[in-house]
Amino acid sequence: MRYEGTVYRPPSEARSLIVQVTIGCAHNNCTFCSMYKDKKFRIRKLEDIIDDLDSAREYYRDIKRIFLADGDALILKIENLLKILQHIKTIFPECERIGIYATPKDILNKSLDELKTLKENGLGIMYMGIESGNNEILYKVKKGVTSELMIEAGKKAKKSGIKLSVTLISGLGGRDKIKEHAMDSARVINEIKPDYVGLLTLMLEEGTELYNEYREGDFDLLSPEEVMIETKIFIENLNVNDCVFRSNHASNYISLKGVLNEDKNRLIKEIDDALKENMYKPEGLRGL
Ligand code: SF4
Protein backbone atom coordinates (compact mmCIF):
# COMPACT_ATOMS: atom_id res chain seq x y z
CA MET A 1 0.00 0.00 0.00
CA ARG A 2 1.14 3.51 -0.75
CA TYR A 3 0.07 6.22 1.65
CA GLU A 4 0.49 9.97 1.21
CA GLY A 5 0.91 12.07 4.34
CA THR A 6 -0.93 11.38 7.58
CA VAL A 7 -3.92 9.11 7.10
CA TYR A 8 -7.00 9.59 9.30
CA ARG A 9 -9.85 7.19 9.93
CA PRO A 10 -12.78 7.02 12.36
CA PRO A 11 -12.05 5.14 15.64
CA SER A 12 -14.40 2.32 14.60
CA GLU A 13 -12.23 1.67 11.52
CA ALA A 14 -9.13 0.99 13.61
CA ARG A 15 -8.79 -2.54 12.24
CA SER A 16 -9.80 -1.74 8.68
CA LEU A 17 -7.62 -1.71 5.61
CA ILE A 18 -7.36 1.98 4.75
CA VAL A 19 -7.26 2.90 1.08
CA GLN A 20 -6.75 6.51 0.01
CA VAL A 21 -9.02 7.26 -2.92
CA THR A 22 -8.53 11.01 -2.48
CA ILE A 23 -5.66 12.97 -1.01
CA GLY A 24 -6.79 15.61 1.47
CA CYS A 25 -10.16 17.30 1.73
CA ALA A 26 -11.79 19.35 -1.03
CA HIS A 27 -13.16 21.84 1.51
CA ASN A 28 -10.11 22.06 3.79
CA ASN A 29 -11.34 25.29 5.32
CA CYS A 30 -12.82 24.47 8.75
CA THR A 31 -11.15 26.70 11.33
CA PHE A 32 -10.74 23.93 13.93
CA CYS A 33 -9.36 21.23 11.61
CA SER A 34 -5.70 20.60 10.90
CA MET A 35 -6.06 17.15 9.37
CA TYR A 36 -5.33 17.92 5.75
CA LYS A 37 -3.72 21.35 5.93
CA ASP A 38 -0.50 19.99 4.42
CA LYS A 39 -2.20 18.32 1.47
CA LYS A 40 -3.42 19.79 -1.78
CA PHE A 41 -6.67 18.08 -2.61
CA ARG A 42 -6.77 15.64 -5.50
CA ILE A 43 -8.53 12.49 -6.56
CA ARG A 44 -6.15 9.59 -7.05
CA LYS A 45 -5.93 7.80 -10.38
CA LEU A 46 -8.25 4.81 -10.51
CA GLU A 47 -5.43 2.50 -11.65
CA ASP A 48 -3.32 3.48 -8.60
CA ILE A 49 -6.22 2.70 -6.26
CA ILE A 50 -6.79 -0.68 -7.95
CA ASP A 51 -3.02 -1.39 -7.75
CA ASP A 52 -3.07 -0.64 -4.02
CA LEU A 53 -6.01 -2.99 -3.49
CA ASP A 54 -4.24 -5.73 -5.46
CA SER A 55 -1.02 -5.37 -3.46
CA ALA A 56 -2.99 -5.42 -0.19
CA ARG A 57 -4.63 -8.66 -1.35
CA GLU A 58 -1.20 -10.23 -1.80
CA TYR A 59 -0.13 -9.10 1.65
CA TYR A 60 -3.19 -9.67 3.87
CA ARG A 61 -4.97 -12.98 4.19
CA ASP A 62 -8.19 -11.85 5.86
CA ILE A 63 -9.72 -8.38 5.45
CA LYS A 64 -13.07 -7.89 7.10
CA ARG A 65 -13.38 -4.12 6.72
CA ILE A 66 -12.09 -1.58 4.24
CA PHE A 67 -12.20 2.19 4.74
CA LEU A 68 -11.98 4.64 1.84
CA ALA A 69 -10.10 7.83 2.79
CA ASP A 70 -9.16 10.79 2.74
CA GLY A 71 -11.44 13.63 3.81
CA ASP A 72 -14.32 13.35 1.42
CA ALA A 73 -13.83 10.21 -0.58
CA LEU A 74 -17.49 10.19 -1.62
CA ILE A 75 -16.64 13.07 -3.96
CA LEU A 76 -15.51 10.52 -6.59
CA LYS A 77 -17.67 10.04 -9.66
CA ILE A 78 -20.20 7.26 -9.21
CA GLU A 79 -18.64 5.18 -12.04
CA ASN A 80 -15.25 5.18 -10.33
CA LEU A 81 -16.69 4.46 -6.89
CA LEU A 82 -18.57 1.51 -8.36
CA LYS A 83 -15.41 0.20 -10.05
CA ILE A 84 -13.60 0.35 -6.68
CA LEU A 85 -16.45 -1.33 -4.79
CA GLN A 86 -16.78 -4.06 -7.43
CA HIS A 87 -13.05 -4.69 -7.44
CA ILE A 88 -13.12 -5.02 -3.64
CA LYS A 89 -15.99 -7.49 -3.91
CA THR A 90 -14.04 -9.58 -6.42
CA ILE A 91 -10.69 -9.72 -4.68
CA PHE A 92 -11.81 -9.49 -1.03
CA PRO A 93 -14.91 -11.71 -0.97
CA GLU A 94 -14.52 -11.99 2.84
CA CYS A 95 -14.89 -8.21 3.34
CA GLU A 96 -18.00 -7.51 5.42
CA ARG A 97 -18.13 -3.74 5.35
CA ILE A 98 -16.78 -0.86 3.31
CA GLY A 99 -16.83 2.59 4.91
CA ILE A 100 -16.20 6.08 3.58
CA TYR A 101 -15.83 9.70 4.73
CA ALA A 102 -18.58 11.83 3.22
CA THR A 103 -19.24 15.54 3.50
CA PRO A 104 -22.87 16.73 3.36
CA LYS A 105 -22.15 18.22 -0.07
CA ASP A 106 -20.81 14.88 -1.37
CA ILE A 107 -24.03 13.18 -0.26
CA LEU A 108 -26.23 15.91 -1.76
CA ASN A 109 -24.33 15.75 -5.06
CA LYS A 110 -25.26 12.08 -5.46
CA SER A 111 -28.83 11.10 -6.37
CA LEU A 112 -30.73 8.79 -4.05
CA ASP A 113 -30.57 6.06 -6.72
CA GLU A 114 -26.79 6.46 -6.93
CA LEU A 115 -26.47 6.09 -3.16
CA LYS A 116 -28.68 2.99 -3.27
CA THR A 117 -26.47 1.54 -6.02
CA LEU A 118 -23.41 2.16 -3.86
CA LYS A 119 -25.10 0.30 -1.02
CA GLU A 120 -25.99 -2.62 -3.32
CA ASN A 121 -22.32 -2.76 -4.31
CA GLY A 122 -21.06 -3.00 -0.75
CA LEU A 123 -20.84 0.51 0.70
CA GLY A 124 -21.93 -0.16 4.27
CA ILE A 125 -21.32 3.03 6.24
CA MET A 126 -20.77 6.75 5.68
CA TYR A 127 -19.11 9.03 8.24
CA MET A 128 -20.28 12.63 8.17
CA GLY A 129 -18.97 15.46 10.34
CA ILE A 130 -21.84 17.64 11.56
CA GLU A 131 -19.76 19.39 14.28
CA SER A 132 -22.68 21.62 15.38
CA GLY A 133 -26.34 22.01 14.59
CA ASN A 134 -26.15 25.77 15.18
CA ASN A 135 -25.89 27.87 12.02
CA GLU A 136 -24.00 30.71 13.66
CA ILE A 137 -21.31 28.29 14.87
CA LEU A 138 -21.17 26.49 11.52
CA TYR A 139 -20.67 29.83 9.78
CA LYS A 140 -18.01 30.93 12.24
CA VAL A 141 -15.99 27.73 11.90
CA LYS A 142 -16.33 27.90 8.08
CA LYS A 143 -17.91 24.49 7.77
CA GLY A 144 -19.38 25.54 4.45
CA VAL A 145 -22.85 24.09 5.06
CA THR A 146 -25.91 25.05 7.08
CA SER A 147 -27.76 22.82 9.52
CA GLU A 148 -30.59 22.62 6.96
CA LEU A 149 -28.21 21.09 4.41
CA MET A 150 -26.80 18.76 7.08
CA ILE A 151 -30.33 17.52 7.76
CA GLU A 152 -31.10 17.09 4.05
CA ALA A 153 -27.86 15.15 3.49
CA GLY A 154 -28.33 13.04 6.61
CA LYS A 155 -31.90 12.11 5.73
CA LYS A 156 -30.86 11.21 2.20
CA ALA A 157 -28.06 8.99 3.49
CA LYS A 158 -30.50 7.22 5.82
CA LYS A 159 -33.03 6.75 3.03
CA SER A 160 -30.39 5.03 0.89
CA GLY A 161 -30.04 2.30 3.52
CA ILE A 162 -26.32 2.96 4.05
CA LYS A 163 -25.52 3.22 7.76
CA LEU A 164 -24.81 6.76 8.89
CA SER A 165 -22.34 7.74 11.58
CA VAL A 166 -22.08 11.43 12.50
CA THR A 167 -19.76 13.39 14.77
CA LEU A 168 -20.23 16.56 16.78
CA ILE A 169 -17.69 18.56 18.74
CA SER A 170 -18.52 19.80 22.21
CA GLY A 171 -17.16 23.22 23.03
CA LEU A 172 -17.12 24.31 19.39
CA GLY A 173 -19.28 27.37 20.07
CA GLY A 174 -17.22 28.52 23.03
CA ARG A 175 -18.70 29.75 26.33
CA ASP A 176 -21.30 32.07 24.78
CA LYS A 177 -23.00 29.35 22.80
CA ILE A 178 -23.19 26.39 25.18
CA LYS A 179 -26.98 26.19 25.17
CA GLU A 180 -27.49 26.97 21.47
CA HIS A 181 -24.80 24.48 20.41
CA ALA A 182 -26.26 21.71 22.56
CA MET A 183 -29.91 22.28 21.69
CA ASP A 184 -29.48 22.87 17.94
CA SER A 185 -27.17 19.87 17.68
CA ALA A 186 -29.81 17.70 19.39
CA ARG A 187 -32.47 19.07 17.02
CA VAL A 188 -30.37 18.14 13.96
CA ILE A 189 -29.71 14.63 15.31
CA ASN A 190 -33.42 14.17 16.09
CA GLU A 191 -34.26 15.08 12.48
CA ILE A 192 -31.60 12.91 10.85
CA LYS A 193 -31.89 9.90 13.19
CA PRO A 194 -28.38 8.57 12.39
CA ASP A 195 -27.30 5.07 13.37
CA TYR A 196 -24.27 6.30 15.32
CA VAL A 197 -23.49 9.60 17.04
CA GLY A 198 -19.97 10.40 18.22
CA LEU A 199 -19.37 13.39 20.44
CA LEU A 200 -15.76 14.58 20.58
CA THR A 201 -14.46 17.41 22.75
CA LEU A 202 -12.75 20.35 21.11
CA MET A 203 -8.95 20.40 21.31
CA LEU A 204 -7.13 23.25 19.66
CA GLU A 205 -4.25 22.51 17.37
CA GLU A 206 -1.49 24.92 16.52
CA GLY A 207 -1.71 26.21 12.99
CA THR A 208 -5.49 26.31 12.88
CA GLU A 209 -7.49 29.52 12.65
CA LEU A 210 -9.42 28.65 15.80
CA TYR A 211 -6.18 28.24 17.75
CA ASN A 212 -5.12 31.72 16.65
CA GLU A 213 -8.52 33.13 17.69
CA TYR A 214 -8.03 31.53 21.10
CA ARG A 215 -4.51 32.97 21.42
CA GLU A 216 -5.84 36.42 20.58
CA GLY A 217 -8.60 36.12 23.19
CA ASP A 218 -11.41 35.89 20.64
CA PHE A 219 -12.45 32.35 21.53
CA ASP A 220 -12.99 30.61 24.90
CA LEU A 221 -12.21 26.98 25.53
CA LEU A 222 -14.74 25.35 27.84
CA SER A 223 -13.69 23.96 31.21
CA PRO A 224 -14.41 20.24 31.80
CA GLU A 225 -17.46 21.24 33.91
CA GLU A 226 -18.82 23.39 31.09
CA VAL A 227 -18.29 20.54 28.63
CA MET A 228 -20.31 18.30 30.97
CA ILE A 229 -23.11 20.88 31.23
CA GLU A 230 -23.22 21.24 27.44
CA THR A 231 -23.20 17.45 26.96
CA LYS A 232 -26.01 17.07 29.49
CA ILE A 233 -28.22 19.61 27.67
CA PHE A 234 -27.44 17.84 24.38
CA ILE A 235 -28.38 14.38 25.68
CA GLU A 236 -31.47 15.65 27.51
CA ASN A 237 -32.78 17.08 24.25
CA LEU A 238 -32.06 14.02 22.10
CA ASN A 239 -34.97 11.88 21.05
CA VAL A 240 -33.79 9.02 18.82
CA ASN A 241 -34.23 5.28 18.89
CA ASP A 242 -31.67 2.54 18.28
CA CYS A 243 -28.94 5.13 17.95
CA VAL A 244 -25.51 4.16 19.28
CA PHE A 245 -24.02 7.08 21.22
CA ARG A 246 -20.29 7.29 21.90
CA SER A 247 -18.37 9.98 23.70
CA ASN A 248 -15.38 7.87 24.62
CA HIS A 249 -12.79 9.39 22.33
CA ALA A 250 -9.31 10.34 23.54
CA SER A 251 -10.43 14.00 23.51
CA ASN A 252 -13.33 13.46 25.93
CA TYR A 253 -13.05 14.29 29.65
CA ILE A 254 -15.16 11.29 30.68
CA SER A 255 -16.18 8.18 28.77
CA LEU A 256 -19.86 7.87 27.89
CA LYS A 257 -21.45 5.17 25.76
CA GLY A 258 -24.89 3.74 25.32
CA VAL A 259 -27.86 3.30 23.05
CA LEU A 260 -30.41 6.09 22.81
CA ASN A 261 -33.09 6.59 23.96
CA GLU A 262 -32.91 3.59 26.28
CA ASP A 263 -29.69 4.65 28.06
CA LYS A 264 -30.47 8.35 28.24
CA ASN A 265 -31.16 8.50 31.99
CA ARG A 266 -28.04 6.48 32.80
CA LEU A 267 -25.88 8.74 30.65
CA ILE A 268 -27.30 11.84 32.34
CA LYS A 269 -26.64 10.28 35.74
CA GLU A 270 -23.02 9.56 34.75
CA ILE A 271 -22.61 13.21 33.78
CA ASP A 272 -24.16 14.34 37.10
CA ASP A 273 -21.78 12.02 38.98
CA ALA A 274 -18.78 13.44 37.10
CA LEU A 275 -19.92 16.98 37.94
CA LYS A 276 -20.31 16.03 41.63
CA GLU A 277 -17.01 14.18 41.91
CA ASN A 278 -15.11 16.61 39.71
CA MET A 279 -13.16 13.71 38.21
CA TYR A 280 -12.03 14.27 34.64
CA LYS A 281 -9.34 12.91 32.37
CA PRO A 282 -6.22 15.04 32.95
CA GLU A 283 -5.40 17.42 30.09
CA GLY A 284 -2.10 15.62 29.48
CA LEU A 285 -3.92 12.37 28.73
CA ARG A 286 -6.32 13.89 26.21
CA GLY A 287 -5.58 13.57 22.51
CA LEU A 288 -7.05 13.66 19.04
S1 SF4 B 1 -13.47 19.07 9.28
FE1 SF4 B 1 -13.85 17.73 7.52
S2 SF4 B 1 -14.67 19.13 5.95
FE2 SF4 B 1 -13.68 20.41 7.48
S3 SF4 B 1 -11.60 20.72 6.72
FE3 SF4 B 1 -11.52 18.97 8.14
S4 SF4 B 1 -11.80 17.18 6.83
FE4 SF4 B 1 -12.43 18.95 5.62
Image (cartoon, grey):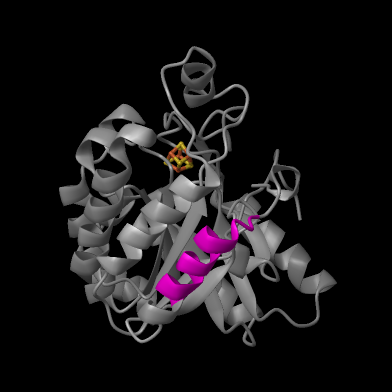
From this view, report whether residue 99 is shown above or below residue 285: below
The residue segment tinted magenta is 267-280
Task: Point out the quarter of the image occupied by ligand 1.
Answer: top left
The total of numbered circles placed on residues is 0
**Image coordinates for residue 49, horizontal then vertical, percent:** 62, 55
Q: Quarter holding the N terminus?
A: bottom right
* Residue 50 visible at all: yes
Left or right, 117 with respect to 93, comes to left
Left or right, 155 with respect to 182, comes to left
Which residue in the rendered view is the most extreme toward the right? Answer: 59
Which residue in the rendered view is the most extreme toward the top? Answer: 216
* Residue in the picture at 67% in, 54% down: 281
Residue 269 covered by magenta stretch: yes
* Residue in the picture at 80% in, 74% down: 60
Left or right, 27 with respect to 137, comes to right
**Image coordinates for residue 39, horizontal then vertical, percent:** 59, 30
Residue 218 covered by magenta stretch: no
Which corner quadrant of the image does residue 146 belong to? Answer: top left
* Residue in the picture at 42% in, 32% down: 30
Q: Main secondary structure of the magenta part?
A: helix
From this view, report whether residue 257 is shown above or below residue 6: below
Q: Nearer the viewer, residue 40 or 171?
A: 171
* Residue 72 visible at all: no
**Image coordinates for residue 187, horizontal then vertical, percent:** 20, 60
**Image coordinates for residue 205, horizontal then vertical, percent:** 61, 31
Q: Nearer the viewer, residue 23 or 235?
A: 235
